[in-house]
Image (cartoon, rainbow, N blue to C red):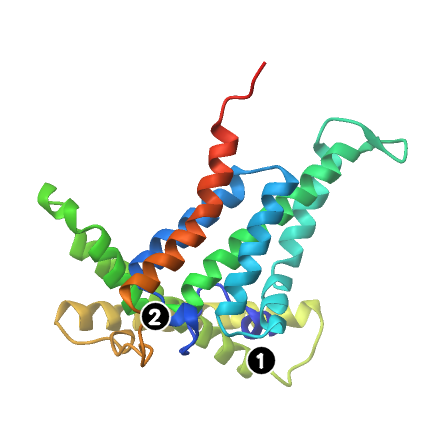
């Protein structure tokens, strides 16, 4: 199951890169805005500008390009299905004179794959460089004004922490299940049989571990994610805001161009 080794979305790796030291609340604002912008813009020039920003941020994360490439390859079947769906079912000009193949659908499918890739990269930049504990605290900080409306902001932060901490546990249990099935006969029938045999115990172990985490948090005990491997050095306040403003210029400019009324 190499997909578990290459999957970067939802995984955190400690480090001392520029993005690791970037302020977590500002990062929690920036990355979702970039994900939204990835789907809001459709022009190739705008997507190229976002891709350039994604490359710069990926370089600032400290991870080799091979990691990002393999992380995107994990979604290759999703990309292929998306492309085939648009190719066969989108109206427009035909491709190679074949009635059920759409040239416009091909272009639209490639654009959607481009947008999905950008969304995966921007989302992974947040989770790879920010621990679950820092994301939860950043959410509570940003949502603090909502406490005046008596909304359960702290409770929501605990829920986010549990969710983000559960993803590595799921990955660990799947790796254990893969190890147990190693050395057994190959083939589709054997794989289906192993899946049927291991699925029940896997779900039970996940439920037990999720219950342990919830009880520990309810009793005031620290989860392992609370032991925050924060970077040793943090960026200064002015540098955080400077980098945040520079990065936000791209989505603000692109969305502004999209919303700006065109002349007749």
- Please state if 120 lies on the left or on the right of 183 as rendered: left
* Any part of residue 148 in sight: yes
Residue 6 rendering spot, x and y as whole percentages: 57, 71
- Please state if 241 lies on the left or on the right of 186 as rendered: left
First-in-chain label (1 vs 2): 2
Q: Quadrant of residue 105?
A: top right
Q: Secondary structure at mark 1?
A: helix
Residue 175 rendering spot, x and y as whole percentages: 51, 77
Point out the residue furthest to the bottom here: 183
Q: Which mark is residue 181?
A: 1
Q: Which mark is residue 131?
A: 2
Q: Quadrant of residue 98?
A: top right
Say above or below: 161 vs 34. below
**Residue at x 42%, y 71% (from the top left corner):** 18
Observer-side mark, 1 or 2, equals: 2
* Any part of residue 163 in sight: no
Q: Quadrant of the C terminus?
A: top right
Q: Secondary structure at mark 2?
A: loop
Q: In this view of the protein, which residue sits in the foreground, 77 or 226?
A: 226
**Residue at x 56%, y 17% (from the top left corner):** 263
Between the residue at mark 1 and the residue at mark 2, the CA separation in whole angstroms equals 31 Å
**Residue at x 16%, y 45% (from the top left corner):** 146
Mark 1 touching mark 2, by CB under 8 A?
Answer: no
**Residue at x 32%, y 67% (from the top left corner):** 132
């Amino acid at each position: 199951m190499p997909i578990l080794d290459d999957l970067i979305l939802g995984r955190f790796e400690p480090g001392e890169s520029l993005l690791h030291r970037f302020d977590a609340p500002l990062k929690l604002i920036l990355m979702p805005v970039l994900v939204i912008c990835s789907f809001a813009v459709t022009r190739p020039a705008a997507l190229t500008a976002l891709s350039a920003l994604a490359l710069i941020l990926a370089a600032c994360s400290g991870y080799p390009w091979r990691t990002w490439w393999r992380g995107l390859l994990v979604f290759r079947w999703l990309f292929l299905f998306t492309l085939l769906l648009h190719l066969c079912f989108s109206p427009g000009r035909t491709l190679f004179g074949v009635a059920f193949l759409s040239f416009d659908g091909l272009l639209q499918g490639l654009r959607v794959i481009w947008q999905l890739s950008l969304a995966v990269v921007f989302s992974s930049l947040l989770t790879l460089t920010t621990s679950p504990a820092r994301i939860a605290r950043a959410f509570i900080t940003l949502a603090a004004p909502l406490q005046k409306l008596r909304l359960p902001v702290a409770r929501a932060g605990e829920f986010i922490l549990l969710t983000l901490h559960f993803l590595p546990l799921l990955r660990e249990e799947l790796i254990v299940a893969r190890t147990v099935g190693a050395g057994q006969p190959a083939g589709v029938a054997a794989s289906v049989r192993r899946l049927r045999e291991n699925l029940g115990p896997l779900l039970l172990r996940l439920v037990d571990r999720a219950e342990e985490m919830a009880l520990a948090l309810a009793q005031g005990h620290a989860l392992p994610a609370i032991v925050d491997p924060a970077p040793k050095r943090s960026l200064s306040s002015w540098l955080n805001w400077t980098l945040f403003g520079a990065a936000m210029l791209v989505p603000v400019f692109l969305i502004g161009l999209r919303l700006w009324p065109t002349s007749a």
